[in-house]
Image (cartoon, grey):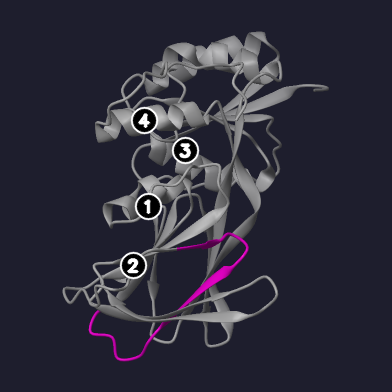
């Protein structure tokens, strides 16, 4: 890299030792001729990267901090090193004591960089786009009132423009999840666990009124289109990554498609994903070292 290189630290102040660790990282990187900028948050984060180019982002927190960082950095092609300051996470994989080892591997081109599918979600209302954002984990359409049951007309549209009608869903809501998000809300609602490197999307009804409504897996190049039907008994809400909410109106069309960019996660390889699965779900089996393996390529 020519000239001054830049790193952005995204710091979750709710995590113990996050500020102390960020100060230590900044000191080390500045000795390596990096300019470091920090964004600290306590609660619900919100910011946009404009006018500054970064070579690397580092999220200091848990999986939720990575989700936020990915929405900000993935559209710009900035890789993210997820340093884990929470419990064992499915995305945040680098232990705080191993960050410099992981950084050395990334700078030397030896680190695994996982390319994760992201979704772009838009809401069409009265022929206009009323909302448009991206997400790494999932888009959830659900009731926001006491009466939980909502009605959605759901279909997919292939890359060639052919529509496939999936039918009317009467349920507490609908989850559209990426492989990364398969271990989140979707698995709690009975969805499958999917290898994070795969290219597909899970359509998963939440507590469907008709028990035969089951999760469906579709190719990532298909659009998922959900229509909020009229005469709902409850208000309807769209939630992205569990962090962004948008109220919906009757007649809204929610269009969910794969984003034209990927979340680039440094040192979040498949071995660490399966280690997290075994630990969190109590599976038995062989042991995979939970530390960082800079030579792994996934």
| Circle nearer the viewer, 4 or 3 | 4
In the picture as drawn, the residue positioned furthest to the right comes out as 2
Could you tell which of marks 4 and 2 lies nearer the N-terminus? 2
The quarter of the picture where residue 211 lies is bottom left
Q: Is residue 293 above or below residue 155?
A: above
Which dot marks residue 240?
none
Could you tell which of marks 4 and 3 lies nearer the N-terminus? 3
- Which residue does the image show at 62% across and 57% down from the upper left? 259
290 is within the stretch colored magenta: no
The C terminus is located in which quarter? top right
The quarter of the picture where residue 138 lies is bottom left
Residues 63 and 61: in front is: 63
Element type at mark 1: loop
- Judging by the rendered image, the residue that carries numbered circle 2 is 214
Q: Would you say 190 lies left or right of 117 here?
A: left
Which dot marks residue 192?
1
Q: Is residue 280 visible?
A: yes
Residues 90 and 31: in front is: 90
The N terminus is located in which quarter? top right
Disc 4/disc 2 C-alpha distance (Å) = 26 Å
Q: Are marks 1 and 2 in contact (CB under 8 Å)?
A: no
Residue 255 image offset from top left, x and y in percent = 53, 72
Disc 4/disc 3 C-alpha distance (Å) = 16 Å
224 is within the stretch colored magenta: yes
- Judging by the rendered image, the residue that carries numbered circle 4 is 276
- Which residue does the image show at 44% across and 32% down from the upper left? 273
- Which residue does the image show at 71% across and 36% down from the upper left? 53
- Judging by the rendered image, the residue that carries numbered circle 3 is 66
């Amino acid at each position: 890299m020519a000239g001054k290189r830049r790193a952005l630290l995204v710091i979750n102040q709710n995590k113990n030792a996050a500020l102390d660790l960020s100060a230590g990282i900044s000191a080390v990187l500045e000795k390596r001729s990096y300019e470091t900028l920090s964004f600290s948050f306590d609660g619900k984060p919100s910011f946009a990267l404009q006018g500054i180019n970064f070579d690397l982002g580092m999220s200091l927190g848990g999986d939720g901090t990575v989700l936020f960082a990915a929405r900000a950095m993935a559209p710009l092609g900035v890789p993210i090193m997820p340093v884990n300051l929470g419990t064992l996470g499915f995305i945040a994989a680098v232990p705080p004591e191993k960050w410099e080892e992981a950084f050395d591997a990334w700078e030397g081109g030896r680190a695994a960089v996982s390319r994760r599918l992201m979704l772009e979600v838009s809401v069409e209302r009265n022929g206009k786009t009323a909302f448009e954002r991206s997400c790494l984990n999932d888009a959830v359409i659900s009731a926001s009132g006491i009466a939980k049951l909502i009605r959605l007309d759901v279909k997919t549209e292939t890359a060639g423009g052919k529509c496939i009608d999936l039918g009317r869903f009467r349920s507490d809501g609908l989850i559209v999840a990426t492989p990364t998000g398969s271990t989140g809300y979707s698995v709690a609602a009975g969805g499958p666990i999917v290898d994070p490197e795969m290219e597909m999307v899970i359509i998963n009804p939440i507590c469907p009124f008709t028990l035969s409504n089951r999760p469906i897996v579709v190719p990532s190049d298909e659009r998922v289109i959900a229509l909020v039907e009229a005469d709902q008994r409850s208000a309807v809400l769209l939630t992205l990554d569990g962090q962004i909410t948008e109220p919906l109106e009757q007649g809204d069309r929610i269009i969910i498609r794969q984003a034209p960019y990927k979340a680039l996660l440094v040192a979040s390889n498949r071995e660490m994903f399966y280690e997290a699965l075994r630990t969190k779900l109590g599976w038995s089996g062989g042991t995979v070292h939970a530390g960082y393996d800079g030579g792994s390529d996934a």
